[in-house]
Image (spheres, rainbow, N blue to C red):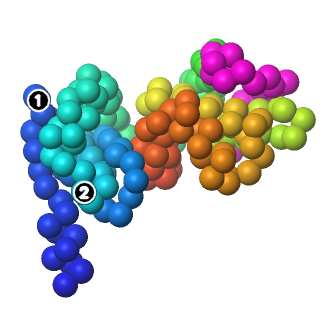
C-alpha cells in the first residue's frame, strides 16, 4: 500500500532541455536538486499545484542547466581527490584558500557578522567548523564541489556565529541567506565522499 502511495507522488515533466521528476511529500518547502547522475528532482509539499511547480522550475532553468553541465564534467572524471599528486593537491589547497576566503568575506558582509581566522584543512568527515572564538575551518575539497555547495558550507558556518547549534533558529538563519540550502545539504550527503 505504501509503495503505491509513493509511486503516485512521483511524476515526470519536461522543462526546455531537461526532464525532471516531482516527488510530493509531507514537507513545507519546495526544493530543486540536480544529482550527479544527471537526474533533476523537485521535492514539493503534497498539495502544491502543478502550475506552481512548473513556474518554480522555470525560474531555476538556467541554474539547472549549469548544474547539468557540471555533472556531465564530473561523470567524465573519476573520484576527484584520490589520484592527485602532491603538487596538484597543493594547487587545489591554495585555490580553496583563495576562493573560500573571498566567499566568507562576501557572505559575512551580507549577513552582518564578523569572524577572526580562516583555516583550510583536509578532514575526513567535516566540511567546515566554527569555534566559539569565531575561527572558521574549511575542508579544501570543497573546491571540487559545485560552487553553490561551497557557498552553502560557508553560509552554514557563518550562521554559527549567530547560533552555535543546529536549532530551528539556526536553520532559519541559513534559509534567510540561502532558501534552497536543503538541495546543497543533500548533495554533500550523497556526493561528498566522491570528492
Residue 117 counted in the magenta span: yes
Task: Identify the residue at image location x=19%, y=48%.
Answer: 49
Q: CA distance from mark 1 to mark 2?
A: 27 Å
Secondary structure of the residue carrying tag 2 is loop
Secondary structure of the residue carrying tag 1 is loop
**Quarter the N terminus occupies:** bottom left
Q: Nearer the viewer, residue 39 or 5?
A: 5
Residue 22 counted in the magenta span: no
Q: Taking 42 as reference, is 190 left or right?
A: right
Q: For the view shown, which residue lies furthest in the bottom direction? A: 1
Q: Taking 131 as reference, is 51 left or right?
A: left
Task: Identify the residue at image location x=75%, y=37%.
Answer: 162
Decide if residue 8 is in sight here: yes
The part of the chain drawn in magenta is 104-124
Q: Earlier in the sequence, mark 1 or mark 2?
A: 1
Q: Taking 6 as reference, is 179 left or right?
A: right
Q: Residues within 10 Å of mark 2 (few under 14, many from 20)?
A: few
Task: Identify the residue at image location x=21%, y=42%.
Answer: 53
Task: Identify the residue at image location x=63%, y=52%.
Answer: 168
Do the residues bearing badges 1 and 2 touch, measured as CB atoms within 8 Å?
no
The residue pinned by badge 1 equals 17
Q: Nearer the viewer, residue 120 or 89?
A: 120
The quadrant in which residue 110 appears is top right
Q: Nearer the viewer, residue 92 or 59?
A: 59
Decide if residue 68 is in sight here: no
The residue pinned by badge 2 equals 47
Amino acid at each position: 500500500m505504501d509503495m503505491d502511495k509513493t509511486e503516485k507522488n512521483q511524476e515526470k515533466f519536461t522543462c526546455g532541455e531537461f526532464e525532471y521528476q516531482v516527488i510530493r511529500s509531507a514537507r513545507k518547502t519546495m526544493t530543486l536538486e540536480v544529482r550527479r547522475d544527471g537526474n533533476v528532482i523537485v521535492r514539493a509539499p503534497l498539495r502544491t499545484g502543478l502550475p506552481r511547480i512548473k513556474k518554480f522550475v522555470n525560474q531555476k532553468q538556467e541554474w539547472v542547466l549549469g548544474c547539468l553541465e557540471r555533472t556531465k564534467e564530473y561523470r567524465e572524471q573519476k573520484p576527484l581527490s584520490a589520484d592527485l599528486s602532491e603538487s596538484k593537491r597543493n594547487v587545489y589547497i591554495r585555490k580553496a584558500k583563495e576562493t573560500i576566503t573571498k566567499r566568507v568575506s562576501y557572505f559575512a558582509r551580507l549577513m552582518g557578522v564578523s569572524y577572526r581566522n580562516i583555516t583550510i584543512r583536509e578532514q575526513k568527515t567535516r566540511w567546515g567548523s566554527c569555534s566559539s572564538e569565531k575561527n572558521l575551518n574549511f575542508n579544501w575539497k570543497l573546491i571540487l564541489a559545485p560552487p553553490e555547495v561551497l557557498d552553502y558550507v560557508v553560509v552554514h558556518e557563518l550562521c554559527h556565529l549567530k547560533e552555535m547549534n543546529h536549532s530551528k533558529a539556526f536553520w532559519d538563519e541559513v534559509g534567510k541567506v540561502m532558501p534552497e540550502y536543503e538541495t546543497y545539504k543533500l548533495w554533500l550527503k550523497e556526493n561528498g565522499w566522491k570528492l
